[in-house]
Amino acid sequence: MNTESYIRALSETDRSLEIVTDAAACADYISQNRSLVSVSEPKAVLYPVCSEQVQDIVQKANEYKVNLVVRSSQGTVSMSGASLPVAGTDCVAVNLSRMNKIMNIDAKNNMAIIEAGVTYGQLNDALKPYGLYVEHPLSPRAEKSVLASLIDRDPVMTAKHLWDVPDPLCAVEMVMGKGRLFRSGSAAGPGTLDEMLEAGCGINQAQGPVWLDLARVITGSQGTLAIVTWASVKVRQIGSEYSLTYVQSDDADQLAAYASQVIRRRLGEEAVILNRRGMRNVFGMTEKDAAAMPKWTYITSARGFRYFPEMYRDNQVLDMTDIAAEHGLALKTELPGLDNAAVRRILEETSKDGDYWKERDGRTVTHRFILNTMDKIGFYTALAEEAVKHCGLDAGNLAVYAQPSQMGRNCHIEFIYSADPGKAQQLEETLSVTLLDNGAFFSRPYGVITEEVYNRYADQKKYMPVMKEFFDENRIMAPGRLCY
């Protein structure tokens, strides 16, 4: 790899671009790899601050045949390893964390335009004066990039507002692997972004009966096709009234049937399903309080907005109470061992620095996630518990987090276990194969299961090189990831 010539060419073209080649800094770049994937140190780290610099970086990488990996979150923690070079590959890292401008907030149309490095905490702080917030995953890491999360298809907590896979992601500006700049949806023009905003254009996703949205193609691609520099995202009203509701059961199927009905009738806002260990991990419950609960808990919030907010909120709670009774369940507004104010903070805010809920045990974390329907939560949990026991571990320490999505049509089901490194590696392999053998759908596979997933979907796999050729002809983007 012609790294030295590449770096020299970049520095001569743009002296304002920060380029780090120090060996200690490159080693530190991968020091917080929390995944079980082996990675290599980057040969250099680049810190662009604008789209023009990103485009120059990619174009010269094609010219000098230099491989690139990209990350946009702050800090150096990587839960999946997707932002780091695969072991055995030579890459230069492109770090977009300094591209952290909030470019526009459109309170009238409930839209925001942000650069790649903007974090959830930063964006929600900026939206709060407008009475708005951005939908987000369950208590995301404080330094997590909004766009990195959405492009990676992390599930957000408001299932009833999600009509399609990319929601709430809308239009994006991307630099393709060949160095071309492309804007999707209404961001494509005509005119510059400033001219479109001045004319009152909403920067939304592609519309119409016949349309092409390349933003949909790059979601879940783990940096193998393009680098997103900025995008527009939908934001929502916070509301003036708020109540939490809890429904619990030892039967996952019973609780899933209730949750499905609630979401289908568009009741509540944030909604998550957790098992006992999940409740303990997320909300910091004591062992005693968590053990006294039924196995499963469905949590949702009811909000009241501009018109008759108290009545709107209360009617939702009453409807959910009736639906719970129809399913032989009871709706509660409080639970022993939980403080509602603290629960609301955790549902609405990011994790505190150094206190991410998936890592509170302090050991190596195995986390596998799949997509399926809500009625399969119990089925896959039973399989996961058997896999845990097979590895000689305590199934009672398995945390399960189920996130309904897309109007309840599907559900992100995640299994999290903290163990010593050797056992964590064994469990990840055993759990991955067990789930895959039983029809689990890995919509964005990481680590040990990736190759097997693509081998089992040969009909789809054969089309992926076509997309790689279209976006990244010289194959410089994140070599070794997915099936590339």
Image: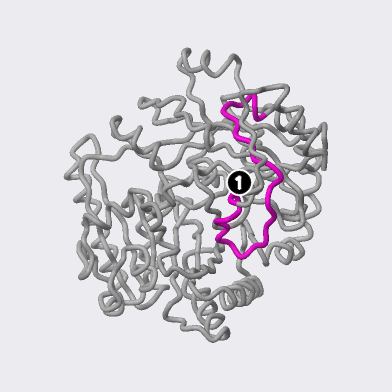
**Residue 210 in view here:** no
Tell me where residue 272 sits by quadrant.
Answer: bottom left
Question: Few, some or many C-alpha atoms within 10 Å of disc 1 (few <14, some 14-19, many ≥20)?
Answer: some
| Residue shown at the point (39%, 53%) measured from the top left | 139
Front one among 481 and 361: 361
Q: Is residue 142 above or below residue 203?
A: below
Q: Is residue 39 magenta?
A: yes
**Residue type of the residue flagged with mark 1:** Ala
Q: Is residue 349 left or right of residue 217?
A: left
Per the rendered image, the range of residues in magenta is: 28-54
Please say whether residue 293 is visible from this viewpoint.
Answer: yes
**Percent x, y of residue 61:** 77, 35
Q: Which residue is mark 1?
A: 25
Query: Which one is nearer the viewer's eye here, 89 or 233?
Result: 89
Residue 361 percent across, percent down from the top left: 42, 69
* Callout 1: SS: helix
Q: Residue at x 73, y 66 (%)?
A: 452
Q: Is residue 21 above or below residue 287?
A: above
Q: Position of residue 481 (x, y in %)?
A: 71, 53
